[in-house]
Image (cartoon, rainbow, N blue to C red):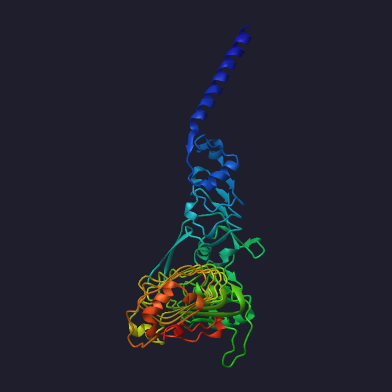
Amino acid sequence: MKKIKTYIAFATVALGLSFSSCSENEETIDWNGIELKNTELKNVLQQKGFTFNEAGRLVQDDKVKSTTTLDLSNCNLSDISGLEVFPKLTDINLSDNKFTYSFDFSILPGTVTSVDLTGNEIYEYPGLVNIKTEENGDETVTVQRKLTKLLLPEAAKYNCVEIPTYFANSKETDMQMENAKGIPAAYTTLREVPDDNVRAILKELFPSMFKEDNIDISKRLVVASEKSKNISISPKKTVGSEAVEITSVEGFEYIAMNKGYEGAQISISASKSCLIPYLKLGSTFTAYITDNVSTPNLDISNAVNLCLIQITNDAELDKLDLSNCRLLGQRDYDLETSPFNNPSIIVLHHCDKLKTFTLPKKAKMVMMLQLVNLPLLEDIDLSDLNFIGSTILGRLPKSEIKYFDYTRWDGFGKAAFSITEEVFQQAGTKAFLEKYHSNLYYEYIDSELGLENFKWKDFYK
């Protein structure tokens, strides 16, 4: 009997301890939950079995608190804000999602040390390093995210700033980047130049940037005879050389985006349509001319000195915002009208996806404006200008043109004005011509533009 009493007492104590333990665990769980404002992430976590209360808040239970690895691959995510709800998260797989253009590492919780970004179209990587450049060109680099593993998409090969800088300052990180077949391999700063003719041109212009036949983006252009050279690639016959076939222009972008490059002009022409997925122009550029080069991600936000823009046969460009160009159309009369001073010229021909085109608000005088065969281009606002020396507007089926008042002529007796019939039929065009037809002259449109000649002058005798 004594033994039985002892057993019951022991059991009671054990049960009491058990009840006490459960009670303590319940107190540590936040049943009120945490609100996730990121609905994309919330939906994915619900599908993966994480608990949400009746109010739709994430319950911070043991599963949330103990999660160290999170597989969010192929979940159609474009936003991962809110992951700080996982206090022990270290490894995250974000492959095959919808992250595009830029991925900000500062959004990731500080506990994360391994990130997989393969299968995404990401070109810029803020939050990895902070680069402070002195006036003399010296750089101070601070690594902002210390990672043990970083898997990058193929698009990362075009990044010439954050990724190669991080690579140079984070030797302990296992860095891999997808190749053209989507297979991750050890990251390298060597970039191929597929076209033999383009490689030969770039090698002649910028020999210090090459390691055998590859461009090394880890190198900074410092050779005085190279860093200020303009980039010019063309299949057309030139004096002393034969015409060449250029089927890919890949390679010039690595020179143009090099931190030491100080050239002013890019002039690129290909024999057939070529794709440059990402190109960001710096402040030294004054002229950008391309033909048969498609640029879905052309960034000219830093090209503040750009005055000449000529883009023809670009199948991917969908917007062109010149708002940050501080000189275009904003200099005095002598500079804007002299062919020797890089006058403001805008030529856009056959850009099938171009929807928006924006001029700087302070632009007043443009020497040449040609907008031709732009089937998707929306409203064209020229109202802030006071002079255009030569205008060609044609095949703009979706564009409603907002014209300007000529308030300055100076040495110009008349200005050239050429349009196609559908542009003439716009009420705004007719009002503009009614007011200024005596100050304008009809100019024959080059047949190479594929436009019919419309003699609007016949309506104003």
**Which quarter of the rendering shows the N terminus?**
top right
Relative depth, front residue between 69 and 238? 238
Residue 321 x, y percent position in the rendering: 45, 69
Q: Quadrant of residue 199?
A: bottom right
Relative depth, front residue between 346 and 460? 460
Q: Tell me what residue is drawn at x 34 percent, y 88 percent.
A: 411
**Which quarter of the rendering shows the C terminus?**
bottom left
- Residue 1, compared with residue 294, is above or below; it is above
Viewer can see residue 72: yes
- Which residue reaches farthest bottom? 240
Image-based side of 362 in relation to 374, left or right: left
Relative depth, front residue between 149 and 198? 198
Residue 339 x, y percent position in the rendering: 41, 87
- Residue 194, compared with residue 185, is above or below; it is below
Residue 238 x, y percent position in the rendering: 57, 90
Q: Tell me what residue is drawn at x 37 percent, y 81 percent.
A: 436
Residue 453 x, y percent position in the rendering: 52, 83
Viewer can see residue 328: no
Q: How many discs mark residues in the rendered view?
A: 0
Q: Tell me what residue is drawn at x 50 percent, y 78 percent.
A: 421
